[in-house]
Image: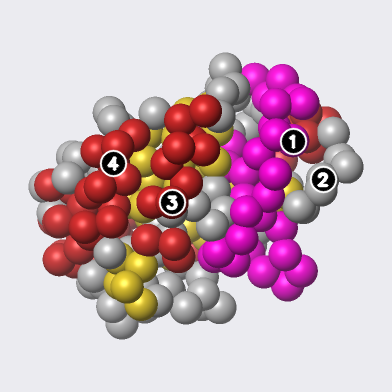
Amino acid sequence: MKLKVCGITQLEQLIQLDSLGINYGGLIFYDQSLRWIDNKLKAGEVKSLPLTMEKVGVFVNAEESYIMEQVENFGLDLVQLHGDETPGFCNQISSKVTVIKVFRITQTNEQNIDWMVKPYEEYCDYYLFDTNRKNSYGGTGEKFDWKILNENKINKPFFLSGGIGLGDVEKLKTFEHPFFYGVDVNSRVEITVGIKDIKSIHEMSDQLLFK
């Protein structure tokens, strides 16, 4: 199981999280997010860090040229498409960089998730399932019912997201799905918006034995 910490806004915390062996660090390139990295992280400094952790750029309905510019400037390893991107758009991006496509799930989702993801199956490398809330693209701090995922086959590795924190460790240990790949944490592991609780993340990582 992998651990992704999203919404990082400080260079020092990128380094700290890397030293803990965190697998993925998420940087948000969306100007409506409270964790937008503009004026917080400098591209050259981030790119030059000798990190083992893979850097994920989070984008919402961004232009391809903007996404690829940030991939180059920040040395991003993956791109997370968190908006309403089409399968064709994902195809364009995935030909150049590894793609995580996000799908927002309602609390009592009545959609067939397999049908939801099917058009994207060939055009992305991972899925991420987050909680759906009107007029929001993530960072809600809210959970959806994970059992919904067990009612679907979902034949691609996926991240579980949405209001996950240290208090969910026992529940995560019992959640099983053949393609459950990793956990994405954000608002529930913060001291304040954009500032991560490193101690809490360390404890969570140790308890779940992320590798």
Identify residue type, mark 3.
Gly
Query: Regarding mark 1 in the picture, which secondary structure is present there?
Result: helix
Name the N-terminal-most of marks 2 and 1.
2
Q: Quadrant of residue 143?
A: bottom right
For the residues labelled 4 and 2, say whether their Cβ atoms are less than 8 Å apart.
Answer: no
Task: Say if 47 sits above or below 98 in the image.
Answer: below
Residue 147 in percent (x, y) is at 70, 34
Q: Amino acid at mark 1?
A: Ile
Task: Give the label, 2 or 3, closer to the camera.
Answer: 3
Q: Earlier in the sequence, mark 1 or mark 3?
A: 1
Apparent side of residue 71 relative to residue 89 in the rendered image (left or right)? left
The numbered dot on residue 205 is 4
Quarter in which the C terminus is drawn = top left
Q: Which residue is mark 3?
A: 167
Q: Which kind of residue does numbered mark 4 sit on?
A: Ser
Kindly state the secondary structure of the residue where label 4 is placed: helix
What numbered label is drawn on residue 148?
1
Q: Residue at x 72, y 20 (%)?
A: 153
Considering only order in the chain, which callout, 3 or 2, is on the residue closer to the N terminus? Answer: 2
Give the foreground label among 1 and 3.
Answer: 3
First of labels 4, 3 by sequence position: 3
